[in-house]
């Protein structure tokens, strides 16, 4: 890669946990995609020029993109700076990796602007410097798929395994309410009974096996969560009705996306995935709740350069 004066990059929304892998699994979605425009400046450091689409802090220290960008600049040790125009398409508090899309696009974008050929695993700690601003923690289950693309398993030592992605059609529905991750974590018990831990461990192992075996159906059927989801369902808007509508429309599995309020549903063809979106939409329309529906596949591409720069 050669250095540039300006560049536009994008990073995908992501589904963390994927029901069976609390805090350790995540996948990249084809849409929505978050765009970031970066311009090289003579003034060292990061400046945030504009944030479009969300009300987020303009101060670098309090901004996810800002801190991820700063971390890459510091690692590179360059004497120039960067100006960011952030287009928030993955909305904060949605449960589809808003802060991860910001962190991944900023870390990847600054490296691309510099012409630095960092691999995703090298960028991960710098992107996590940004993610930490929003979540207070260094969970990689959204950031890793936003950087790497595909389906990622995050190991406790910080390494990432990229798994063969099942051939699924995904329907993600985002009701326009906000659930803060910290609140969704506060409802979780500190300890889990041994039988629940063993159950979850076996299901995650089975899921990983099914991904490697290329058995998309069996991988979907392995998606069960006895650790977090039962405690979080009361926070989710109309979850029982949404789940019933999705399964009746042909979804084979699904659950809460990340810490919610979005949910994701798995089908095996594009028409069914559309019908699932319509069925959930009908539930929310009846309840008078605005929502967005995204239908697509698992995105193989993580953060990337856009062909049509600003
Ligand atoms: N694994 C995290 C959680 C995802 O469910 O709390 C949100 O950052």
Image: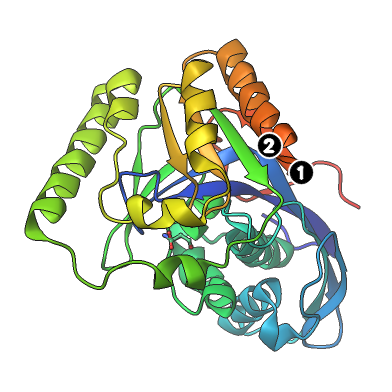
How many labels were placed on the picture? 2
Q: Residue at x 39, y 68 (%)?
A: 187
Check the image and report above or below for 23 versus 204.
below
Label 2 secondary element: helix
Mark 1 / mark 2, whichever is N-terminal: 2
Q: Position of residue 197 (x, y in %)?
A: 14, 55
Determine the image quadrant of residue 30.
top right
Q: Residue at x 51, y 65 (%)?
A: 123
Check the image and report above or below for 136 versus 26.
below
- In the rendered image, the residue lying farthest to the front is 287
Left or right of residue 79: residue 299: left
Q: How is the image coloured?
A: rainbow
Determine the image quadrant of residue 173.
top right
User: Which residue, given by chain and number where applicable, does mark 2 sit on?
Assistant: 284
Left or right of residue 172: residue 217: left
Check the image and report above or below for 35 versus 31.
below
Specify few, some or many for label 2: CA neighbours under 10 Å numbering under 14, 14-19, or 20 or more: many
Label 1 secondary element: loop
Between 193 and 10, the one nearer to me in the picture: 193
Q: Residue at x 58, y 56 (%)?
A: 97
Labelled disc at residue 290? 1
Specify few, some or many for label 1: CA neighbours under 10 Å numbering under 14, 14-19, or 20 or more: few
Q: Position of residue 25 (x, y in %)?
A: 37, 50
Whole-angstrom CA distance, mark 1 to mark 2, is 7 Å
Q: Residue at x 27, y 22 (%)?
A: 218
Mark 1 and mark 2 residues within 8 Å of each other at the beta carbon: yes
Q: Position of residue 163 (x, y in %)?
A: 34, 39
Say whether mark 2 is within 8 Å of ligand 1: no
> Is any atom of residue 119 visible in this view?
no
């Amino acid at each position: 890669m050669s250095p540039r004066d300006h560049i536009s990059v994008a990073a995908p929304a992501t589904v963390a946990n994927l029901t069976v892998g609390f805090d350790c699994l995540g996948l990249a979605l084809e849409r929505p995609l978050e765009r970031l425009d970066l311009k090289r400046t003579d003034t060292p450091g990061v400046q945030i020029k504009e944030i479009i689409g969300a009300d987020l802090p303009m101060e670098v220290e309090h901004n996810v993109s800002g801190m991820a960008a700063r971390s890459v600049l510091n690692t590179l040790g360059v004497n120039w700076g960067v100006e960011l125009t952030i287009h928030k398409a993955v909305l904060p508090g949605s449960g589809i990796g808003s802060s991860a899309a910001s962190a991944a696009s900023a870390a990847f974008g600054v490296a691309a602007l510099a012409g630095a050929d960092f691999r995703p695993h090298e960028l991960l700690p710098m992107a996590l410097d940004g993610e930490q601003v929003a979540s207070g923690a260094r969970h990689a289950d959204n950031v890793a798929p936003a950087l790497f693309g595909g389906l990622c398993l995050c190991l406790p030592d910080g390494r990432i395994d990229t798994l063969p992605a099942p051939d699924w059609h995904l329907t993600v529905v985002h009701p326009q309410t906000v659930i803060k991750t910290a609140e969704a974590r506060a409802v979780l018990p500190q300890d889990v009974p041994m039988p629940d831990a063993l159950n979850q461990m076996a299901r995650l192992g089975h899921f990983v096996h099914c991904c490697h075996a290329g058995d998309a159906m069996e991988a979907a059927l392995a998606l069960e969560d006895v650790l977090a989801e039962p405690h979080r369902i009361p926070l989710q808007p109309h979850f029982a009705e949404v789940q019933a509508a999705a399964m009746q429309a042909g979804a084979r599995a699904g659950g809460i996306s990340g810490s919610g309020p979005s949910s994701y549903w798995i089908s095996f063809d594009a028409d069914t995935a559309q019908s699932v979106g319509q069925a959930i939409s009908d539930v929310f329309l009846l309840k008078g709740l605005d929502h967005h529906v995204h239908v697509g596949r698992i995105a193989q591409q993580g953060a990337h350069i856009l062909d049509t720069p600003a």
